[in-house]
Amino acid sequence: MRSNHETDEKTMTATTSKNSAPAGPDAQTEPMAASAIILLFVGLMIAMFMFSLNQTVLATALPTIVGELDGVDQMLWVSTAFMLASTIMMPVYGKIGDLFGRKPLFMFAICCFLLGSVFALIANEMSTLIFGRVLQGIGGGGMMILSQSIIASVVPARERGKYMGIMGSAFAVSSVAGPLIGGWLTEGPGWRWAFAINFPLGIIALIAAAVFLKVPKHTKGAGPRPKIDVIGMALISIVTSCIVLTSAWGGHDYEWGSWQINGLIVTGIIAAVAFVFVELKVSEPVIPMHLFTNRDFLLCTIAGLFVGIGMFGVLSYMPTYLQMVHGIDATVAGLMMVPMMGTMLVSSTLVGFIVSRTGKYKKYPLTGILIMAASLVLLSQLKAESSAWETIGCLALLGLGLGLSMQTLVLVVQNAFPVSMVGTATASNNYFRQVGATLGMAFIGSVFTQRLMDNIKSGITEIAKAAPHGHMPKISSTGLTPEIVSKLPEPMHSLIITSYNDALVPLFLWVAPLAVLGFVFLCFLPNTPLAQTLKNEPAKRESLDVEAERAGVVSVPVSTPAETSSVSVAESPLSKEPRNDSTDHTQLTRDRDPRTDH
């Protein structure tokens, strides 16, 4: 006779190879003590802070960096290279972590991130800097995904809301600190120190990972070692690269319709089709296709992709815009981003605790994504002569929308899958959100750069025609820095400011409809109750609940009468299960709905 644990694992991991170990590498056999979870969370927060700080610390330093390295035309790649590498690696880290354990992989990711910081620190040309950013992205993708996966493997979904909210607030804090630190370093010891500060943080993160991350070691099953989906990983890398390169090069480096762009599109389509076929055949797919049959995962992933486009499209270029258009230094530009991150911090933390207390979550991402759409529309209306307060207000509104929606969507995805699959599910969801982020940065960066160059060239031509005998200062369109722009005489000074404004802010209106579309998708998000235990997170919770409702099966309450009376009738029977008891919940589930196997 099979034990209850073995039967439960078989039910939850229907897509896992028969030869694989029955339990995930970090699956919990019993709850961790609260003190152990807190120590674990400290290490994860340090790594999360390090990763998110790196995303924003260059925002205010970027104009100076590309000006000194004579690479304004390659400005988008400083951010895009990092995002592309981290996006490609996310599903890889998620799957390998599920199969072989997350702690060694987590420490490797930190080391890779630090190696990339070395190359970026010593860069004397754009190519070296971009290469360093690629290495940072390879490590950063693992730091982000594994932080979320590890906490999901030790904390039930119902309690996890507050942890995810704090993680979201950590991102907000680092996003505030990043531009400020980057601006202060740029004006003081130099922008290279923005990479040097990664080393003390990295050492602390490594020590914390080695000491505090007490996740259970992977117990090998009787079967052979699981096979890594190398072909799938290679194909998804090709697909992601083709998407990003098409967005970045189309209409900028190469004309739309050119053989280079058409070749990327065709290659991407072929690789995507091949990827689907491979994932359907292999025993351990990097992104299992059955994930997309789960409505929670599908709708949250689509909405997350749209959120990523809007968020990083603004974050990547707004500090540069503020410095150039408002004539402020890098530190002040960082301070102007504080309201956005402040509202994001407060809303993310509050929503996390509210969701943990009530178990209700759907209204928050719906409200947040609508607020995000409104803020993008308002940002698109900014003018070169608009006051700084108008810009600050729009950014604060955007932060509120992001705080209400971003981390909640990750929580909903994690709730839909068991611990043995939570890394793969989290990584797959974050992969598509990062694809959106990379698309947003690449598309907006490419169009912004092209429009900026065109505006400056046409403006100089007009000025030359109006004053053919006037003195024209010699400037390099690829070597502009805020300091150079501030010293330009009129009408060149006004030309540069207007060119920056007219090249960037109208693009936000192009992105706003995507947020509205994300709202439409989230309207169909089911109210799946948040699980209160780690053992009873079924891989197909939604389908089981729906079939039970259709069959008219009435659940058998396992709580006391007092507890039952306080639970909403809309909640799943799973949400009524006590957190720490020895009841055979798997047997109850089978008895409750004996027809689901048919």
Image: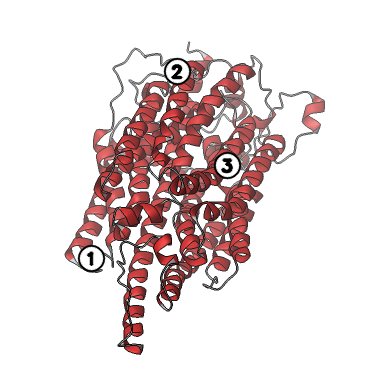
For marks 2 and 1, give the CA distance.
Answer: 47 Å
* Horizontal arrangement in the rendering, residue 162 relative to residue 455 (left or right): right
Q: Secondary structure at mark 1?
A: loop
Looking at the image, which is closer to me, 220 or 357?
A: 357
Which label's residue is closer to the chain start, 2 or 1?
A: 2
Looking at the image, which is closer to me, 72 or 154?
A: 72
Question: Residue beneath label 3, please?
Answer: 173
Question: Residue beneath label 1, please?
Answer: 254
Which label's residue is closer to the chain start, 2 or 3?
A: 3
* Horizontal arrangement in the rendering, residue 94 relative to residue 270 (left or right): right
- Tell me if residue 139 comes above or below residue 254 in the rendering: above
| Foreground: disc 1 or disc 3 | 3
Looking at the image, which is closer to me, 425 or 196?
A: 196
Q: Residue at x 32, y 36 (%)?
A: 116
Mark 3 residue type:
Val
Q: Position of residue 141 (x, y in %)?
A: 39, 37
